[in-house]
Image (cartoon, helix red, strand yellow):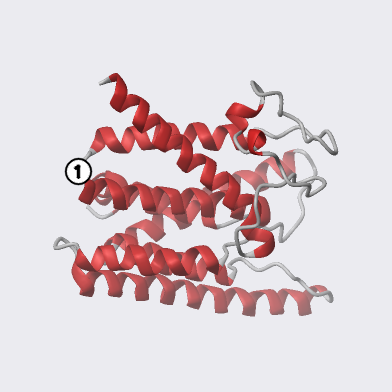
Amino acid sequence: MAGMIAVIAMLGWLSGLAVNLLADSLPHSRRWAGPHCPGCTAPRPPAAWSSLLAIPLGAGRCAYCGRRRGLRWPAVELIGIAGFGLLYARDARPATLLPALLVGFTFLLITIIDLEHRLIPNVIVLPAAVVLGAIGILDPGRGAVKVLTGGLAGAGSFYLLYLMGGVFARAMARAHGRPIDEVAFGFGDVTLAGLIGLIVGWPAVVLALLIGILAAGVFSLGHVLVSLLRRSYSAFTPIPYGPFLVLGASLVYYGGRALFQSILLP
């Protein structure tokens, strides 16, 4: 039992480490570029690849610029350990566990990059769509029709929102007499919505995206109220939308579908 717990913790730690390394590389080069310091871009020695191991090994700061790592790196490694353990405890059958781990890995990586860079790279979404879409098609509980319909519904609905957001931005730019570069939805949100549709299938994609939109709306309202109280409100302040879509998809994919259906679709 102790040996299995150690194996699970190790695999979870490795997944969190991989997420951190990819989140440092993909937004800049769209490919694996090796671990480096985000401050001076100097390469990190192997002892500094893992944040949880760096401090005991005396590599908590960059050897070149002295910059200390933020909280994201150890937090993601701990999330990887906890997430792997929870998913293993939930259902250890390989046919269920492997797709759940791939979905969790993809969602965590997308969330971090969108929070830090307001970017959802195709280099993540497109391979994930192929792999996770194929897994869904081969799943007897879903099949090709539900998976592909979910993907088309997700991408199609958000593509319409993306077009509407562009029209709204141009109208506001004319009204204010200045260009507005920020839009409510980026095209990365369109591709992410399509990926979510492939993962959860039809009709669950409707619920997943609805939860994400509602969560983003609640957060935006709270952000506006806090900004007004602090007298720092600025119109058209962009927020990353991907994490909210990931939240909705995760709640549906990992077992919250029945609960939210009973609340929102009685």
Q: Is residue 245 above or below residue 187?
A: above
Q: On the rendered structure, is 84 left or right of 141?
A: right
Between 233 and 60, the one nearer to me in the picture:
60
The residue pinned by badge 1 equals 93
Tally the marks: 1
Outermost front residue:
46
Question: In the image, what residue occupies the spot 37% across and 37% down?
Answer: 84
Whether residue 50 is visible to the viewer of this picture, yes or no, is yes
Q: Residue at x 22, y 47 (%)?
A: 94
Query: Which residue does the image show at 77% across and 38% down from the upper left?
Result: 230
Q: Is residue 227 above or below residue 70?
A: below
In the foreground, 195 or 164: 195
SS for tag 1?
loop
x, y percentage for residue 171? 70, 79
Residue 144: x and y, percent? 22, 73
Residue located at (51% from left, 63% from top) = 124
Lateral position of residue 43 relative to residue 186, left or right: right
Q: Residue furthest left?
A: 140
State which quarter of the image contains the N terminus. Answer: top left
Q: Position of residue 188 (x, y in %)?
A: 55, 68
How many residues crowd mark 1 within 10 Å: few (<14), some (14–19), many (20+)?
Answer: few
Q: Front-most of 23 and 53?
A: 53
Question: In the depicted view, which residue is nearer to us: 1 or 46?
Answer: 46
The three-letter code of the residue at mark 1 reads Arg
Where in the figure is residue 189, as x and y percent of width and height? 53, 66
